[in-house]
Amino acid sequence: MKGRDKISDSKFGIGKDGENVPLSFIDNFKTLQELVLSFKSEEAFLNNFDQLQYVTFPRLKVLKFLDECPRVEILIKFLEINGKNLEELYVENNDNLLNLNIAKLCINLKSLYTIFKDDEVETLKVILSNCQYLESIGVWCDGEYLNEKDFLEILVKYSSKNFNELRICYVYDGPSEIFPEELEEFFINWKNRIPRKSLSFILKGYCVKSFENKKENMKVIEKYKKLGIIKKFEIENFSEE
């Protein structure tokens, strides 16, 4: 079954080699719990994912688009029906309307990966406020995307009591713009949260070495690891892939 990474009553995945595989047959899997799609072009979704926009998957918990996404209006229709049951959503797409609908339609999410521009911080606040079960979020920072300092400040103020993992992806190769005093302020504020959960702090991208090379930043990280505020710290450089 070329192009399909895995298929069962509960899981379905399709990779880039399966872009021409019609998705309409998936509506037969009413017990589907996980749907992972990796298409390299938006055209691959046209007249394809569209066939699923009105299908109900009452047990669907995980939805991931690893590359391109369906058209926003089609995905929103799908989320209107299936979003409430989702616990994990991965979308490599920047669309403010989509993110606003995620906040409204996917209130039971535990894990979210999506993209915000630097002028969409209010939408980020809405998602964090509405999704009270959210434990993990992944975002893009750098350039026209979120500013690291702004993201951390919003996270402390608006994330739920269950939150315990942040993932920052740097999409450009410029230096990290976060300063040690800003990191220190974030971790002090996190330490004072009630209730407080220890954090997984994960950085990925082209410029993470510049973060790691700032000795003062790493001193802050080590300090809060020893205090138990950080339970896991990871760095992954894109250039190493």
Image (tube, rainbow, N blue to C red):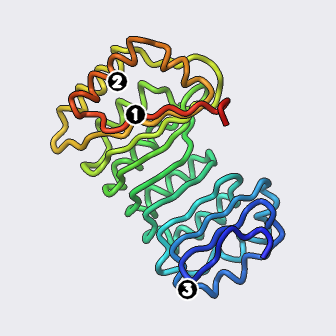
- Distance (Cα) linking label 1 and label 3: 39 Å
Is residue 119 something one can see in this rendering? no
Question: Residue at 55% of width from left, 21% of height from top?
Answer: 209
Front residue (pair 128, 104):
128
- Distance (Cα) linking label 1 and label 2: 8 Å
- Distance (Cα) linking label 3 and label 2: 45 Å
Front residue (pair 63, 122):
63
Number of other residues with Cα within 10 Å of mark 2, as a class: few under 14, some 14 to 19, many 20 or more: many
Number of other residues with Cα within 10 Å of mark 1, as a class: few under 14, some 14 to 19, many 20 or more: few
**Left or right of 49 in this view: 131:** left
Residues under numbered marks 1 and 2 in contact, where contact means CB atoms less than 8 Å apart: yes
- Residue type, mark 3 in image: Lys
Write down the residue under mark 1: 233
Q: Position of residue 226 (x, y in %)?
A: 24, 27
Is residue 144 something one can see in this rendering? yes
Q: Position of residue 45 (x, y in %)?
A: 76, 64
**Left or right of 195 in this view: 72:** right
Q: Position of residue 15 (x, y in %)?
A: 73, 62
Write down the residue under mark 3: 30
- Residue type, mark 1 in image: Phe
